[in-house]
Amino acid sequence: MSDGNIDLAAEARAQAYALPLDQLNPGDPALFRTDAHWPILERLRKEDPVHYTAESEYGPYWSITKYNDIMAVDTNHEVFSSEGGITIASQEGEEGPLPMFIAMDPPKHDVQRKTVSPAVAPANLAILGPLIRERAAKILDGLPIGQEFDWVDKVSMELTAMTLATLFDMPQEDRRKLTYWSDVVTAVPGKSPLVDTIEQKMQIFIEYHAYFTGLWNQRVNAPPGGDLISMLAHGPETRNMEPREYFGNIVLLTVGGNDTTRNTITGSVLALNQNPDQYKKLRENPSLIPSMVSETIRWQTPLAHMRRIATQDYELGGKTIKKGDKVVMWYVSGNRDDEVIERPNDYIIDRARPRNHLSFGFGIHRCVGNRLAELQLQIIWEEILKRFPEIKVVEEPIRTYSSFVKGYESMKVIIPARA
């Protein structure tokens, strides 16, 4: 970390502790853009782990910041409902929250999730594995040596888009549409280089919807197949869903299959650069790759939060959460809780229990594609270590303006030429 970054971190810490507790708003996306959210979450864990923000751009909401409290909320879907949306920005009663199975409660959630889960089941991952490896090798072999390039664009986006296009059984030449649409879904108009206005965002959604309507029409008139679209088009519980609900599930599968893995691939390179002793350890012992992958998923926490709505009054941490209140589980904070995770701010690729993290969620909404995410990360690093002694990050990454997707717009790197 450069001296400039140390100064910025110290300034963020001073500001986080200077504000009155009731004025803390951990959901401010500007904090995540500048990587300044850590001291606010640290303070909340210490002083007010069940915290109420009365005024924010999202309205009032509760922040749950400790690991065990997050687990208690995430595993209690009867009290903490997903209906209506999973992000802090979703407002009750607002026009147009898209229905999708992650934003549903049982029984509807269960049958829709069950319909698509075979696509990421172990049998299908065994088929996908060699294809992912072949693509990863081709991507890495095409990288420039001794020249700066954007790792996000050339590697992270490319591998995840290829995999997701395969899961949808859509033409590979269209794969970057998935990257674009996924970014538009989570973009804040006026703060993202992709969209300036909400009207522009809605126009892009129309094009996105039309494309996947075309795929639905193809698959519904063809014999059942093993891709996600065909599964939805032929599944007994999903074949008669409303077009809007189908599109909502496509949005979920696009963002879930794209953003999270892509940002962890980038995060792994950044984390190893920031912790050269761990990078050395990995080079000397590639069998640590699975453990490193899990540690990176914890350290990165690619989705910073999930939100719920209380269905009844409920006491947590000595506070009374009222029926109808918005409750935000800060996974990114729970993953740094030193009461559960030893030395949580350190990146340690050979932890005793590296999968002890919240990044995939818990309970009925645990990430359906978690094994596919781990598989892609393991394969890309197996192929990296075969080829490159080092990947150097040459400047601070540009982070996403979002308190939901904790990711990167770009990250410049260089692969040094071999001596």
Image (cartoon, rainbow, N blue to C red):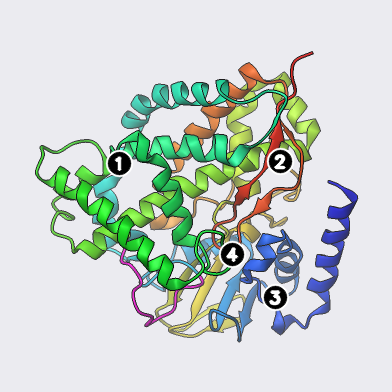
Residue carrying label 3? 48
Q: Is residue 286 left or right of residue 127?
A: right
Which residue in the protein does label 1 denote? 168
Residues marked 4 and 2 touching at CB (< 8 Å): no
Amino acid type shown at disc 4: Ser
Closer to us: mark 3 or mark 1?
1
Of the image marks 3 and 1, the number of the one nearer the N terminus: 3
Name the one closer to the observer, 109 or 130.
130
Segment tinted magenta in the rendering = 88-100
Q: CA distance from mark 4 to mark 1?
A: 28 Å
> Mark 2 belongs to which amino acid?
Ala
* Residue at mark 2: 271
On-image quarter of the C terminus:
top right
The Cα–Cα distance between marks 1 and 2, rounded to whole angstroms, is 31 Å
| Residue 378: percent from left, percent from top | 54, 29
Q: Which residue is mark 4?
A: 403
Rendered location of residue 358, percent (x, y): 56, 53
84 to 325, vertically: above or below: above
Along the viewing direction, whichever of 90 and 197 lies nearer the viewer: 197
Q: CA distance from mark 4 to mark 2?
A: 20 Å
Query: How far apart, in angstroms, are the residues tagged by discs 2 and 3?
Result: 29 Å
Query: Between disc 4 and disc 2, whose residue precedes?
Result: 2
Give the CA distance from mark 3 to mark 4: 20 Å
Q: Is residue 363 visible?
A: yes
Q: Could you tell me which residue is drawn at 31 percent across and 62 percent down?
A: 206
Instruction: From the image, state whether disc 2 or disc 3 is nearer to you.
Output: 2
Answer few, some or many: residues within 10 Å of disc 3's Cα (few below 14, many 20 plus, some between 14 and 19): some
Say which quarter of the image contains residue 119: top left
